Image: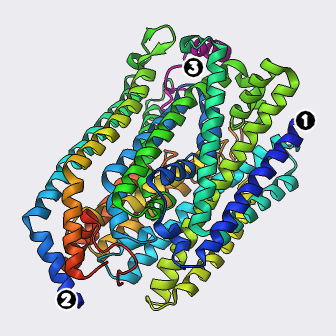
C-alpha cells in the first residue's frame, strides 16, 4: 500500500470517528439551546485543557514552526517561545475573571457595564476579522498539505480548491451539528493524536543521534551550509551591511513580532470562548495549566522536529517540496520511517503524520468558525439587531446560518489566498487580536473608569490601525514576496509599502491601549454600579449559571 | 428579588473588607508577576535583536546562549504557572468561594 492510500484511509477514519462524536453531541445539545455556545459548561478542566491545546496547536505551529526552524534555524524557535509565554497573560489576567463574568462570547465581558449596541457591534466585528485571518492560514495550509499527501501536482489548483472546499464543508458540519460540545470532542481527539505523533517523531529523531542533542544541532548546522544556522538573525532582525536604517527596521520588526505573539493569545476569540466550557473559574485555571503543560512540551519538541528535519532531510529537499518549508515535518517522518523499514516504513510514517496534520487543521478551523458564528449570533444579531429580545432557539439557528456563511466566505477567500505564507497570516491574526481585543478585555476587567467610548475606540482603533499598517506594509506590495509582487529588476511596480515593518504590532498594540484610554477620559459616562457587579462577580463567580437574568 | 436590591449586594460586597482583601491578594500576585515575566521575555527578545554576538556564544559544542535562554523561557513559564496555582489554592480559592456562597444566598441565586 502506498502512502497516498494509507493516508486517505487514516484520514477517512478520523473524519468518521469525529463525525460520530459530533452527531452524538448534537443530539444531547437539543436539551438546551445555550449548549451550542458553551457545550453545557460541563467539561472538566483536564478535558478543556486538552481541547485548548487542540485549538491552539494549529497547522502553523506543527507545520509552520518545524519548517521555519528547518530552513531558518534558530529564528523559528522564537515563535515557539512567544506562543507559549503568551499563556501566562491568559492564566494570570484573563481566564478566571472571564469565566466568572461572561457566558458565551468575548463581547459578554467587554459589554458588561457598557451600552450594549456599540460595544457588541465592535466586539463582533473584531472577532470575525481575527477569526477569518486565522481561518485563511489554516485552509491555505490544508491545500498544500493534502496536495503533497495525495500526490497531486502542486500547480493543480483545481484539485487544491476541491480540497479546500471539502475542508470547509466538514468544518461547517462539525459546527452546525455538534456546536461547542461536538467541536470540543474534535479538539480533544486531535490534541491527543498530535501529542502522540510529535512525541514519536521526537524520540525517533533523537534516537538517530544517540540522544545527543548537540550532535543533532551540529549535523543540522553542517548540512545547512550556514555557519550561523544555530544563531538568531537568519530570518528576523537581519543585519544588512551598510544600511543601518534597514537593519534597525528589521530589528524593530523582530520586537514587533515578539509583542504580537506574547499579547495575541489572550485576545483570540476562539481561545477566550473555551473558558466558558467549564463550570467554574477554578476549572478554567486547571484547564489553562493543562494547556500550558501540553503546549509547552509540544513546542519544546519543535526543536527536535525542526533541527531534525534540517539535519536528516536537508533544506534543499524541504524547499523543493514547499517553498515555505511547511512540509518539513511530514518529510522528516518519511525519512525516519524509511531508515527503519525501507520504503514501506517511509510511506507509513508519512501517511500517519500527514493524517494527523490534516486532523489538526480541521479541528482548528472548526473552533474558529464556532467563535465567529457565536459572536455574530449572540453579540450582533441578538443584542444589536434584536436589542436583546430574542428567542434563544432562534438565536442558535442564526448562529448555525452564520457558520455556514462564514464557512462559505472563508472557502472563497482561501481559494483566492493560495500561495500566501501561512505563518505570516497567523502572526497577523495575533497582531490584530492583541491590538483590538486585549486592551478592551483588560481595561474592562481591571479599570474602574473604563466606559463605552473607551471600549469602542480601543477595539476599532486597534483593529483599524493594524489593518491600515498591514495594507501599507511589504506584505501587500513592493517586495518579491508581497501579495502584489514586485521583482527586484522590475522597472515600475504598483507599490505603496510606506510602513517599513511586516508586523504592525509594535505600533497598533500600544495604539489600541492608547485609544481605550483616550476614549475613556473624553467621555463622562461611567457605570459604577455595574462595575461593582462585574468586579465582584469576576473575583468570586457569584451568580454564574442558568438563573442569571440579563 | 429586585435588581436594585441586587445592586446593593454587589456594592456592599465590593466595599467589604473581605472582598478588598481578596482583591489585594489577587492583584498583589498577578500584576507584579505579569510585569516580571514580560520584562524577562522582552529582555530575551532584545538580547536576540541587539546582543547577537553575545547570545551566539557557545557554552558547549553547538549549544549557544540563545538556545539556553529560549529553553529557560519554557522553564520560567512552567514555574510561574505552578506558583500561581499554589498561590490561588492557598490564598484565594477559599475566600472567593465563601464570598460567592454568601452573595448567592443574598441574591437568591441557586
Instruction: Judge whether A67 appears above or below A340 on screen.
Output: below
Instruction: Tell me the SS state at disc 3.
Output: loop
Quarter that holds the C terminus of chain A: bottom left
In the figure, B3 relative to A447: above or below?
Answer: below
Q: Residue at x 31, y 77 (%)?
A: B110
Q: Are marks 1 and 2 on the same chain?
A: no
Image coords of residue A486 (percent x, y): 68, 45
Residue sitting farthest toward the left: B17
Residue at the spot x=51%, y=77% of the render? A34
**Which is nearer the N-term, disc 1 or disc 3?**
1
**Residue corresponding to mark 1:** A2
Tell me residue A146's x, y (percent).
79, 46
Q: The numbered mark 3 sits on a residue in which chain?
A: A
| Residue A483 at least partly seen | no
Disc ID at residue B4:
2
Task: Please report the residue visible at 69 percent of the width from the left and 34 percent of the height from the top.
Answer: A325
Residue extent of the magenta highlight: A216-240
Q: Chain of mark 1?
A: A
Residue B76 falls within the magenta-colored stretch: no
Q: Can you say whether A185 is above or below B39 in the image?
A: below
Classed neighbour count for the residue bearing mark 1: other residues with Cα under 10 Å, few (<14), some (14–19), many (≥20): few
Q: CA distance from mark 1 to mark 3?
A: 35 Å
Query: Circle 1 sits in a helix, a strand or a loop, which is it?
Result: loop
Q: Chain of mark 2?
A: B
Residue A468 to residue A112: above or below: above
Foreground disc of the pair 1, 3: 1
What residue is shown with label 3?
Answer: A229
Asked whether the viewer can see residue A409, the reply is: yes
Closer to the camera: disc 2 or disc 3?
2
Q: Are marks 1 and 3 on the same chain?
A: yes
**The N terminus of chain A lies in which quarter of the figure?**
top right
Which circle marks residue A492 in the picture? none
Amino acid at each position: 500500500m502506498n502512502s497516498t492510500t494509507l493516508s486517505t484511509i487514516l484520514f477517512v477514519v478520523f473524519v468518521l470517528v469525529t463525525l460520530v462524536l459530533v452527531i452524538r453531541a448534537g443530539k444531547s445539545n437539543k436539551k438546551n439551546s445555550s449548549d451550542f455556545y458553551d457545550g453545557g459548561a460541563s467539561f472538566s478542566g483536564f478535558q478543556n485543557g486538552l481541547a485548548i491545546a487542540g485549538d491552539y496547536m494549529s497547522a502553523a505551529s506543527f507545520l509552520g514552526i518545524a519548517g521555519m526552524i528547518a530552513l531558518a534555524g534558530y529564528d523559528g524557535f522564537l515563535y515557539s517561545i512567544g506562543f507559549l509565554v503568551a499563556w501566562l497573560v491568559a492564566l494570570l489576567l484573563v481566564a478566571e475573571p472571564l469565566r466568572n463574568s461572561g457566558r458565551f462570547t468575548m463581547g459578554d465581558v467587554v459589554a458588561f457595564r457598557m451600552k450594549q449596541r456599540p460595544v457588541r457591534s465592535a466586539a463582533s466585528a473584531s472577532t470575525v476579522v481575527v477569526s477569518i485571518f486565522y481561518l485563511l492560514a489554516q485552509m491555505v495550509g490544508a491545500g498544500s498539505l493534502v496536495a503533497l499527501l495525495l500526490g497531486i501536482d502542486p500547480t493543480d489548483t483545481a484539485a487544491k480548491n476541491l480540497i479546500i472546499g471539502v475542508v470547509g464543508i466538514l468544518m461547517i458540519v462539525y459546527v452546525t451539528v455538534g456546536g461547542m460540545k461536538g467541536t470540543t470532542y474534535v479538539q480533544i481527539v486531535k490534541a491527543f493524536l498530535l501529542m502522540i505523533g510529535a512525541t514519536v517523531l521526537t524520540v525517533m529523531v533523537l534516537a538517530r543521534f544517540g540522544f545527543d542533542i548537540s550532535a543533532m544541532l551540529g549535523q543540522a548546522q553542517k548540512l545547512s551550509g550556514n555557519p550561523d544556522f544555530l544563531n538568531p538573525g537568519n530570518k528576523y532582525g537581519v543585519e544588512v551591511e551598510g544600511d543601518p536604517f534597514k537593519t534597525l527596521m528589521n530589528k524593530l520588526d523582530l520586537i514587533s513580532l515578539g509583542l504580537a505573539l506574547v499579547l495575541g493569545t489572550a485576545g483570540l476569540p476562539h481561545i477566550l470562548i473555551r473558558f466558558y466550557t467549564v463550570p467554574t473559574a477554578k476549572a478554567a485555571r486547571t484547564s489553562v495549566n493543562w494547556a500550558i503543560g501540553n503546549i509547552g512540551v509540544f513546542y519544546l519538541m519543535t526543536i527536535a522536529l525542526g533541527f531534525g528535519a534540517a539535519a536528516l532531510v536537508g533544506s534543499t529537499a524541504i524547499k523543493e517540496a514547499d517553498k515555505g518549508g511547511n512540509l518539513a515535518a511530514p518529510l522528516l517522518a518519511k525519512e525516519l520511517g524509511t531508515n527503519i523499514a525501507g520504503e514501506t516504513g517511509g510511506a507509513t510514517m508519512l501517511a500517519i503524520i500527514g493524517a494527523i496534520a490534516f486532523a489538526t487543521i480541521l479541528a482548528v478551523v472548526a473552533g474558529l468558525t464556532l467563535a465567529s458564528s457565536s459572536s455574530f449570533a449572540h453579540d450582533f444579531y441578538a443584542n444589536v439587531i434584536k436589542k436583546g429580545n430574542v428567542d434563544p432557539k432562534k438565536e442558535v439557528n442564526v448562529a448555525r446560518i452564520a457558520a455556514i456563511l462564514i464557512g462559505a466566505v472563508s472557502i472563497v477567500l482561501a481559494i483566492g489566498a493560495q500561495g500566501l505564507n501561512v505563518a505570516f497570516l497567523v502572526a497577523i491574526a495575533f497582531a490584530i487580536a492583541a491590538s483590538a481585543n486585549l486592551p478592551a478585555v483588560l481595561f474592562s476587567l481591571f479599570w474602574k473608569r473604563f466606559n463605552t467610548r473607551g471600549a469602542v475606540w480601543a477595539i476599532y482603533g486597534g483593529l483599524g490601525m493594524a489593518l491600515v499598517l498591514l495594507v501599507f506594509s511589504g506584505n501587500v506590495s513592493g517586495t518579491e514576496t508581497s501579495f502584489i509582487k514586485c521583482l527586484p529588476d522590475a522597472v515600475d511596480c504598483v507599490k505603496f509599502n510606506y510602513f517599513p515593518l511586516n508586523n504592525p504590532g509594535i505600533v497598533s498594540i500600544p495604539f489600541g491601549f492608547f485609544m481605550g484610554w483616550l476614549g475613556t477620559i473624553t467621555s463622562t459616562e461611567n457605570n459604577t454600579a455595574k462595575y461593582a457587579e462585574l468586579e465582584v462577580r469576576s473575583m468570586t463567580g457569584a451568580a454564574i449559571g442558568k438563573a442569571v437574568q440579563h | 428579588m429586585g435588581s436594585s436590591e441586587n445592586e446593593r449586594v454587589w456594592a456592599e460586597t465590593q466595599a467589604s473588607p473581605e472582598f478588598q482583601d481578596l482583591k489585594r491578594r489577587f492583584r498583589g500576585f498577578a500584576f507584579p508577576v505579569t510585569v516580571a515575566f514580560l520584562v524577562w521575555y522582552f529582555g530575551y527578545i532584545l538580547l536576540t535583536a541587539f546582543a547577537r554576538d553575545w547570545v551566539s556564544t557557545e557554552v558547549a559544542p553547538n549549544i549557544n546562549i540563545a538556545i539556553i535562554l529560549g529553553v529557560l523561557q519554557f522553564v520560567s513559564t512552567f514555574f510561574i504557572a505552578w506558583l500561581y496555582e499554589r498561590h490561588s489554592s492557598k490564598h484565594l480559592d477559599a475566600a472567593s468561594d465563601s464570598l460567592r456562597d454568601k452573595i448567592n444566598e443574598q441574591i437568591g441565586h441557586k
